[in-house]
Amino acid sequence: MKILITGGAGFIGSNFVRYTIGRYDDEVVVLDKLSYAGNLENLRAFEGHPRYRFIQGDIADAETVRVAMRGADAVVNFAAESHVDRSILDPSPFVRTDVIGAYVLLEAARHDSVARFVHVSTDEVYGEVLSDSVPEHAPLRPRSPYAASKAGGELLVSAYHVTYGLPALITRGSNTFGPYQYPEKLIPVVVTEALDRQPIPVYGDGRQVRDWLYVEDHCAGIDTVLRNGEPGQAYNIGGGNEQCNIDVVERILGALGRPDCPVRHILDRPGHDGRYSVDSSKLLALGWKPTRQFAEALEATVRWYVDNESWWRPMKQRPEYIDYFQRNYQERLAATSP
Ligand code: NAD
Ligand code: TYD
């Protein structure tokens, strides 16, 4: 089968390209805008591979999408603005890519009669889940501009299934970690700041809970939905691994042999979701299950960042990153008593 993978130069998308090319005879076309988070280094291993092609372009541009989707049997849409803190600083690119981009892809997919359209969404669309775990039919109550844009995109996906019969499926994965994650998310921030002997920025009391999922297990879940899921359905993909942030930070510092690294509790994220927790029974019934233990996978991830400084260092030195880092952290630091 020929699969169009949008956002394939990002963290999970590039791991999914690796997962797919390594396991199947499928042909893969990656469409990626190469935003600040897209990086061709993540796909370097596939350059010149006979079953891989890269197209640089925007999913919100109809002509680009029409050309990229030509002959595709399936589409897996990873392309998104993906970071909550950036969505708080400026929601506009989130609406453009996560809502309008999804719409442009859906229009092209229905005109091309694509056989399978998998939309990669997130557990954040449910909003904070302070008790129990939510099933797929729970109401969507997004609370950040990122989560609201993702919810908007997936509501369009559902509508295209109902109205036009598009064989579309949705995945809602939990917090993902592993190699090639852009150094703005919690785990790579902690590892790289600790390696630079900087204090670790923890929002508020650090008691917020996330359900951590190793990236390869997330890819396996998406792959299961792509091949065995029922069109029109959404599937939660949870790691079954709930941890509060401060415990994750301490584990990372332990793995780095730097347990004494200072932690700075800074002004909390506005509207910070206290907990996410999804019920993954529906996907488990399709035969998927997470395979990696959190402690071991986290240590492997920390090791990857230690061994691959040449991957993350140039990104952290870019003016774009420095500007983001200042805007996100300076104000919070200034508002926090030392
Ligand atoms: P990422 O930010 O690392 O990668 C996003 C990719 O999309 C980048 O390569 C970027 O260049 C590309 N992109 C952005 N805008 C584009 C556009 N308009 N056109 C084409 N390409 C564009 O994100 P990620 O962490 O790999 O997340 C991938 C998907 O998984 C997203 O849809 C995200 O919402 C979802 N998700 C992420 C997590 C997580 O913990 N990271 C958890 C659940 C779901
Ligand atoms: P993040 O990796 O941004 O993912 P999400 O917001 O999508 O869950 O953050 C994970 C958790 O870590 C979240 O509760 C916010 C918190 N956090 C910090 O405490 N400090 C940080 O510097 C970052 C980036 C996140």
Image (cartoon, grey):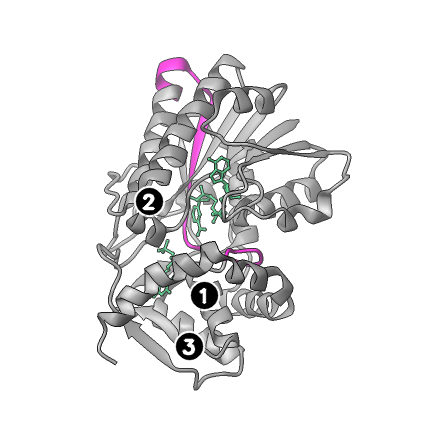
Start and end of the magenta stretch?
161-182
Report the front residue among 152 and 220.
152
Q: CB at mark 1 closer than 8 A to ligand 2? A: yes
Q: Where is residue 314 in the image (x, y as percent from the top left)?
A: 58, 60
Q: Where is residue 290 in the image (x, y as percent from the top left)?
A: 51, 53
Cα–Cα span, label 2 and label 3: 27 Å
Q: Looking at the figure, which quarter contains the N terminus?
A: top right
Do callouts 3 and 1 mark residues in contact (Cβ within 8 Å)? no
Would you name the residue on which mark 1 appears? 189
Q: Where is residue 89 in the image (x, y as percent from the top left)?
A: 30, 51
First in sequence: mark 1 vs mark 2: 2
**Which amino acid type corresponds to the residue marked 2 in the rendered image?**
Tyr
Using the rendered view, name the quadrant where residue 234 is placed: top left
Q: Residue at x 47, y 72 (%)?
A: 193
Q: CB at mark 2 closer than 8 A to ligand 2? A: yes
**Which amino acid type corresponds to the residue marked 3 in the rendered image?**
Glu
First in sequence: mark 2 vs mark 3: 2
Rendered image: mark on residue 146: 2
Q: In the rendered structure, does residue 169 fall within the stretch colored magenta?
A: yes
